[in-house]
Image (cartoon, rainbow, N blue to C red):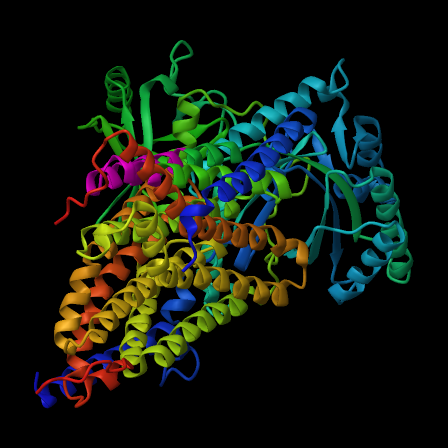
Amino acid sequence: MIKLSSKMRLFAIISSALIVIGLALGTVFHFTSDKFFNYGGEYSSYKSVTVSYVYTEFSKTEDVEKICEDAFGGAGLKSISVASGKAGAGVEITYKFSSSADDKALSAATEAINAKIAEATSMFNDIPQSRASFHTEEAIRGGEKTLSRAAIALAVVFVVSVVYTLIRYKLSAMCVAAVAQLHCFALLAAVLALCRIPVTSSVLVFAVFAALATAVCVSFTLERICRNRKDGDNAKLSLAEIADLSAAQTFKANLVFCVFLALAAVLVFILSFVSSLSLTVILSPALCALAAFAVSFYGGVLFAPALYAAFGNAFAKSKEKPLNNKSK
Amino acid sequence: MGKVKSAIITVLLVAAVIVLALFATISCGVPGSDGVKRYNSFLSMIPLGGDITGEATAVIYPEGVISDSDYNYVVSDEDENNKEKREKYLDKYLSKGSLWIDKEKLGDDDGKAFAESVKNDAEIISDRLSRKGYTGYSVTVVDGYAVRLTIPAGFSYSAYKNYDVSARSEALSDAGHAVNYLTLAGKLDLRDGTEYDSSNSLISIKEDFNSYIKSASAFSRAGTDALRIDLTNEGFDKLNSILTAGDSNSSAYIYVGETNVQLTFTMGTALSDKSLYFQASKSYSEDYAILIDSVAKGARLQNNYNDSKESTATSLLAMTPAYGENAPIWLAAAVGAITLVSIIFSIIKYKRLGIVNSLIILLYALAVITALTIIGIQVTVAGVFAAVLGLALLCVSNVVTFEAVRRETSVGKTISTSVKTGYKNTLFAVLDVHVIMIIAAAIMALVGVGELAACGLIFFIGAIASYVLYWFTRFMWYVISSPARDKFKFCGFAREVEEDD
């Protein structure tokens, strides 16, 4: 049995260091590039090269893709994503590049693609209908509404879970639940800011799931603590010993829960990688999912029992009655 | 419970699960239709997000802006018949990035004010799209003077793979309708002709039809969808006087700018209520509601888009999904593998009790698939995780309880006493977790927008299914274990203390 109660100082140092470094880095990015987080997907601007071709000039998408990839490779460019769709009598292929990609290189690559298309279609007509064009696309921050609503949802979830804990248990348990949840939010925000994981709407969902997973782990641990405090033999133990015992008893269930979710994330993203053959597409949600469940495990399974012992001692010292389960 | 009763209940339940599983997962040609008709499984009818089945995208050009390909198509054509048009284009347009802009539109400030107006329009369009509840969408300003809209194509698997052609065209039609209607510019008007004419407005020049409308919303009851427009008191009186004064054989039409939005009033008939209902499909009524509400509240686009006189008509492209063309298959394989791993784990750990748990896991999967098909929630990769989170909740609740029962058996209690005590001991832990999760999921669904709201709803269904099935596990444990002679062996529990007979 690991004595988690004695590790509170260690956990506090690890968490504070991560939170302070992450938030400081985010603040620096906020003032230098107006980006506390690295907004990705629907919230970020990008550059694109759109290639439209007609079936009368090219019969296979692969032929056009080869021309494009050669041109981008020659200009030293690598696209973030590629998507294609049928458009009238042909197909449109869109290559997305990050907003920091070099304009001159993109223009040169676009010209090279047009030259190659003209060369390949010269036998059909003088003016090719197939054509590539380079665009800069500035994102409209419609995502801000999603972000603000996600923040409101997180705040309400936090308040509800804390109030529920207060109703079910007592003040010290409510403090543990509140601090554990806040710790989870801060840690996840710091990890996102620190690792510069692109924040998309999927990432927001995983952040909320991390908060929920933490709530599950904390809830199981608190309930076990209450039960042990009422148990005849265990009632004689100190608060720290009860916290350690309860953490050990719920460790397996909490571990199964977090590992199950982490494994599910790994499996989904491995198969998504097999499907997309693009690491850039899956990297952001995969990293966020793993970070979310790692934070939940650390916050709910390791940090919360140690926190309970610390709070319990503080409350005991201030002569307040210790935690009591009112449900029975 | 007697052996026969137990066997009957078990067989009935297993048969129900098998039949439901077949309907939920297997798509096939309908026998006797010679391959013409096809049965699409529940799974293949769930609407999927843009990350799994691709997005629909369109670039819209304001009046006075044309694309590079449109411009080049005209100016490169050296045909004598095209000379006048070619010279007009060469004289009229100026290059800005990959776009060609009418010099008059650029004005004295080299197009800064025009670019600003396009950006403002893009923000209004973005706001309108956000109200549509898409799981993901984006609006970008292309080269400063055009707007790109990207929304989920909204395909189910059968539509995505073209097994269900009508569902595919319906999804694309809905997306196209949203793009066309949510980008309409101008103010609301009431006109007495199906085609726009500057003289056919029924509203006097001193009046403003926008002020007649309090709000507009999508309305749904008993499977019928409609647009609901709530009029102000003044609007109700004035609209009534306009409609009753007209010829009873004619109609009046609502316009946004120069576009007839196909919402019709019969003239000569008085309105009976301040709330007006116009029947339309769910997606169309949402589009009308968002458009009319937005325009009535003053959010009007400054530029006209989709001017077919100048550029080729806006075409909506269904793009390949970011996760690859076979993303739905791989995702289904991943979810199948997760379910299989949890089944194998529970059978190894709890022997025949694990089989009971496996049955419950299958029931959970079928319940979620059926609910998603009926409600029609758009499922993204994050949505799949919401369902997996519900499964994890069910599994962990059962594991916690099984372990509590195991602890009781280890101190010498019988299985029935241990089950009773085990469930009693874990009652509040499991209840706490589920109550918090159900409330949290409901908050996510109600407060969140887009993907967050969809995931909240999926998790809400998952959490409720998890709690119901948690108690069903106890019932099935009792039913299936009844005929077993050695109930300890049935559960994979070691008998630590010998029973005293």
User: Viewer-proximal residue, B267 or B291?
Assistant: B291
Indicate the position of residue B413 as horizontal and vertical percent values. Answer: 15, 75
In which quadrant of the rendered view does residue A39 lie? Answer: top right
For residue B26, above or below residue B51? below
User: Viewer-proximal residue, A152 or B500?
Assistant: B500
Inspect this view and state whether residue B139 appears: no
Can residue B172 be found in the magenta stretch?
A: no
Q: Main secondary structure of the magenta part?
A: helix
In screen coordinates, is A171 left or right of B68? left
In which quadrant of the rendered view does residue B82 lie? Answer: top right
Q: Which residues are magenta?
A: A152-177
For residue A221, above or below residue B247? below
Quadrant housing the N terminus of chain A:
bottom left
In screen coordinates, is B319 left or right of B486? right
Residue beneath the point at 48% across and 63% down: A264
Indicate the position of residue B399 as horizontal and vertical percent values. Answer: 31, 67
In screen coordinates, is A328 left or right of B125? left
Residue beneath the point at 62% across and 32% down: A26
Indicate the position of residue B16 as horizontal and vertical percent values. Answer: 24, 78
Q: How many numbered circles does the render carry?
A: 0
In screen coordinates, is B38 left or right of A10? left
Residue beneath the point at 29% across and 32% down: A317
Indicate the position of residue B114 as horizontal and vertical percent values. Answer: 67, 21
Inspect this view and state whether residue A166 appears: yes
In which quadrant of the rendered view does residue B397 lie? Answer: bottom left
User: Viewer-proximal residue, B411 or B354?
Assistant: B411
Residue beneath the point at 64% across and 62% down: A276
Can residue A162 be found in the magenta stretch?
A: yes
